[in-house]
Amino acid sequence: MRVASTIPEMKCLRREISGTLGFVPTMGYLHEGHLSLVRQARAENSVVVASIFVNPTQFGPKEDFKTYPRDPKHDLALLESEKTDIVFMPSDVEMYPQGYSSWVTVENITEMLEGSCRPGHFKGVTTVVAKLFNIVEPNKAYFGQKDFQQATVIRKMVIDLNMNLEIVVAPTIREKNGLAMSSRNAYLNPQERQAAAVLYQALTQAQQIRRKGQKDAEYIRREMYTLIGREPLAKIEYISIADAVTLEELATIDRPAVASLAVRFGKTRLIDNVILE
Ligand code: AMP
């Protein structure tokens, strides 16, 4: 496994590659969710590149950029054990040198859900992902359904800007109690971790209600509010039943929909979602 920490090094390694390149961008502190993406990339490509970069521009001024968990040595050992070929691990100034001033923005679908709670977040995400795509030049890039809106926004950017790669979205990997794996779960204390299982319970309840034929989105939202509201440690930011393509809130579920939520447990903000068939 080769580790590139500068853009010229990464571009140089890229030039030596023939066959398809599968790319897994991450912010590190890797868990089984990330590794499932690496395994899928490994199965589908000749070469696998992962990146580890905690992207400062996608964090708001009051968010957890400084405290975001980091463990590069452990990450590299995990990536090596999954037969990753190249890890791109740039510094902040490598990606954003002094005087940096170019941004990629996707409109509309970035305004709701995560976009309304975290202004500027998606501008940081699309900019860094566009830069990474230009540096790594992947044939396929792998993203988790865990961040459903992020994957949707990136797909839109790739289509709108005619980027020459395929976006693959892989299922959410969960703990035994249903909690979606996330680097931020490291912030949870044992009580919060146990309490956070209510999120997946609410999402699976939404799926069950929908499967029984319920089309009233507000009814399902209310049931989710009630279940999560019973958990004293949970502070709901949003609960959404939205069109799975436009991410607009639905009154009636008459097309593919996504149930998603953002809930705080103490200082930890968690997001999760499921598709409603
Ligand atoms: P992050 O390091 O949080 O930026 O995540 C890097 C990639 O891993 C993103 O595409 C995430 O959607 C994906 N990911 C994070 N958690 C999970 C999970 N539990 N299951 C599947 N993919 C995940």
Image: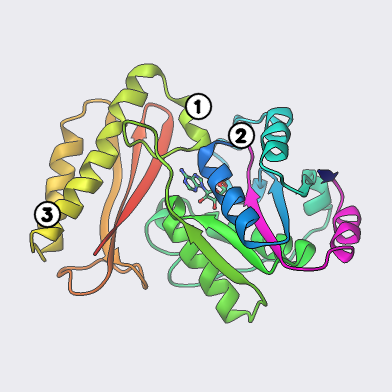
- Whether label 2 touches label 3, CB < 8 Å: no
Mark 3 is surrounded, within 10 Å at the Cα level, by few (under 14), some (14 to 19) or many (20 or more) other residues, namely some
Residue 218 can be seen, yes or no: no
Q: Residue at x 59, y 49 (%)?
A: 39
Q: Is residue 238 left or right of residue 188?
A: left
Residue type (three-letter) at the residue carrying disc 1: Ala
Q: Which residue is mark 2?
A: 29
Residue 271 in the figure: left or right of residue 92: left
Q: Which residue is mark 3?
A: 209
Q: Secondary structure at mark 2?
A: loop
Q: Tell me if label 2 and label 1 are in contact, CB under 8 Å.
A: yes
Distance of label 2 from label 3 (alpha carbons): 35 Å
The number of numbered discs placed on residues in the rendered structure image is 3
Q: Is residue 56 above or below residue 74?
A: below
Instruction: Report the residue that reaches farthest toward the top.
Output: 190
Badge 1 element: helix
Q: Amino acid at mark 2?
A: Tyr
**Which residue has dot 1 on it?**
186
Assess mark 3: CB under 8 A from ligand 1? no
Label 3 secondary element: helix
The magenta region covers: 5-28
Can you say which quadrant of the picture contains the C terminus?
bottom left
Disc 2 to disc 1, C-alpha distance: 9 Å
Which circle's residue, 2 or 1, is located before the other in the chain?
2
Q: Nearer the viewer, residue 255 or 192?
A: 255
Is ligand 1 closer than 8 angstroms to the Cβ of mark 2? yes
Evaluate whether residue 139 shows in this view. Answer: yes
What is the image's colouring? Answer: rainbow
Q: Position of residue 174 (x, y in %)?
A: 40, 39
Of label 2 and label 3, which has the lower sequence position? 2
Q: Is residue 244 magenta?
A: no
For the N terminus, give its image quadrant.
top right
